[in-house]
Amino acid sequence: MTQFSRRHFIKAALAASGGIAVSTPLQAMTRPQLPSEVAFAHGVASGDPLQDAVILWTRATPAAGIQPSGPTRVTWELASDPEFNKIVRRGGVETDLARDYTVKVDVLGLQPNTAYYYRFIGASEQSPVGRTKTLPQEGVEQVKLAIFSCANYPAGYFNAYQLAADRGDWDAVLHLGDYIYEYGAGGYATARAAEIGRALPEDNSGELYTLTDYRKRYALYHTDAGLQALHAAAPFIAVWDDHEISNDTWKAGAQNHSEEEGDFFARRAAAVQAYYEWLPIRPPMGERNPQIYRSFRFGDLLDLHMLDTRVIGRDQQLDFQDYMDSDGNFDGRAFRAAVQDPARTLLGKPQLQWLQEALAASSGRWQLLGQQVLMGKMLLPAEMMTSFYRGGSPDLTAELIGLKAASLQGKPISDSQRARLAQVVPYNLDAWDGYAVEREALYEQVKGLGKNLVVVAGDTHNAWYSHLKDIKGEMVGVEFATPSVTSPGMETYLKMDEKAARELAAGMPVLVDDLQYCNLHQRGYMALTLRRDGVEAEWNFVDNIDSPEFVAVDSHRIVYRAL
C-alpha cells in the first residue's frame, strides 16, 4: 500500500452537480497525476461550511506562455495546522476554460467546530494558505459573524474586507449580495475611478451582458487585496442581490435591462453561472439552477436561513412616480391599494413555504434570516417623499423631524400638523415595505412559533437597526443592516456633507417609529455575535476608500436581549 493510501488521501472526482469536485474520507487512492503549470492570481476561498464538510475554491489559470492541451490539474491539501505538518486530506482536481479555470472541492468527513488550513499546488506555484472552519454540532455558547454587502470596485478599495480579515476570529462571513456591480465605465459610482486607480480595464469596461463579461468582472474584483484576505480568513456563506445580474432585478426583468439589450433570461443565466463559478458555494439544486436559498445550523444556538429576495420569486417593484400627477400630487388611495395587494410576493410561494417549514422545524435558540433588503418598516411622511422626488428640501425634513419630536414629547401641535405626520408612505419600495402583506404573514408565523427572530440586510449602503413590529404594533424581532463596502450611501443621493448626514441620522429614528439607529454616510461592515442571552451588533467603519491605506474609525454597538 502506498504512503498516500495509508494516510487516507483520496482523489477528487467531478460531481454530477456540474463541476464541484467531491472528496470522501477514508478511501484508498493512487498518487494524483502531476499538477500543471498554473498561476493562482485570484487567491483562495472557502464556503458553505457544514458540521462535516466545506467547499474549497481557487482559480488555477495556465501559467504565462503555457498553452494547455487538455484540462489543468492542481493538488489541494487540507491540514489541521497552518504549517501543513498534519495533513488530513489531499486530492487532485481538474479544471479548464469551460469553468473559467475555477476550482471547487467539497471536502467531506471533517470534524465539527474545527479550524482547518488549505492550499492548492501546481507544478511550480503554490496558492496562498486559507483558513476555514466547520460548523459546531452541539454545546455552542457563541457564534461570531462578519456581515457585508455592496462592494463596487470603481467606487473604491475594499478596505472593510481587510479590516474584518485583520480581526480574524470569525466563525463565518455572511455576504448579502452586490458582490460585483454590472455597470460599465462612466456608469454608477465610477466618477473618481481613474483618479484613485480603480478604473475598469478596457476589455471589461462595458456593462455586463454575457458570460465572458461577468467572468472578467469577477476576476477583476478578486484582484483586490482586501477581498483576497477576507476569503482566506474565514468561510463565506453568500447570496446574491441584484447587481450580480442587473439593478433592481425581479423574477422576469430588471430596471437596468431593456429589450434592446437582449434576452433577460439569457443574461440572468450567464450571471448565475459566473456567480456559482467564482463563489465558494454549494448550490442547492445544482450550478445551472437559480434556486439559492438554503439553511445552516450552528448547533442548538443558531439556525441561519439564507434567502433570495431578488431572482426567483419577486414581483416587479412599485414606483412612486406612477402615483404622482404632472403637478407632483400623490394619489395615496391608489398607492395604498397597490402596496396592500395580497397577491404581491417577494419570496415566491415555493420559497415562502420552504422558509415556513424550516422555521417550524428549527430548534436553534435564534433564527437568523440572511437576506438582501430592509424588512423593517421605514415609513416617512408622504410630504417628505414627494419633496425627495422634486430634489429634496433639508428645511422641510428638519421641520417634520421637529414636529414629530414635539409630538412624542407631548407638546401641543395643530391638527393639520398631526395630519402631515400621519400621512406616511414607505421610503423604499424595493424593500419589504413594497410587499407588506407577505411580510405580515411571515411575522404571524414567527409569533405563533415563539421564535427569537433576527434579520440581517444589506442593499441600502447604510447602517440601520430597527424593531420588527407587526400590524398590531407587537414586537416580532429585530433587524440589523450592514453598510456598504464602497457603494455610496444616502449622503450622496441627498447631496449632504458629513455634518448634515449626521444630523439627519440623528433625526431619522425620531421620524420613523420602528427605527432605532442609522448611519447614513460611512462605509464599513457589521459584526454580529450571538449568545444564548442576546445578540450584539457592532458596526465598524473605515476612514476612507480612496486608498488601500486606511484606519478604522467610529463604531457603534447595540445589544438585543432574547425575548
Image (cartoon, rainbow, N blue to C red):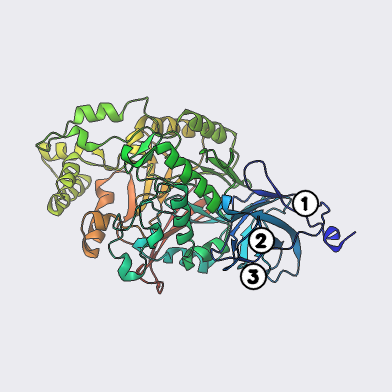
Looking at the image, which is closer to me, 318 or 133?
Answer: 318
Q: Quadrant of residue 519?
A: bottom left
x then y, percent, for residue 286: 59, 40
Of mark 2 and mark 1, the one earlier in the sequence is 1
Q: Which residue bears the numbered disc 1?
A: 25
Instruction: Give the secondary structure at mark 1.
Output: loop
Residue at 50%, 52% in the rendered image: 174
Q: Is residue 531 left or right of residue 381?
A: right
* CB atoms of marks 2 and 1 within 8 Å: no
Badge 2: residue crowd in 10 Å (few <14, some 14–19, many ≥20): some
Q: Secondary structure at mark 3?
A: loop
Task: Give, as a three-letter code, the residue at label 2.
Answer: Ala
Q: Amino acid at mark 1?
A: Pro
- Image x and y of residue 144, in percent: 54, 57
The label on residue 115 is 2
Residue 125 is marked as 3
Is 456 placed above or below 79 here?
above
Q: Is residue 563 visible?
A: no
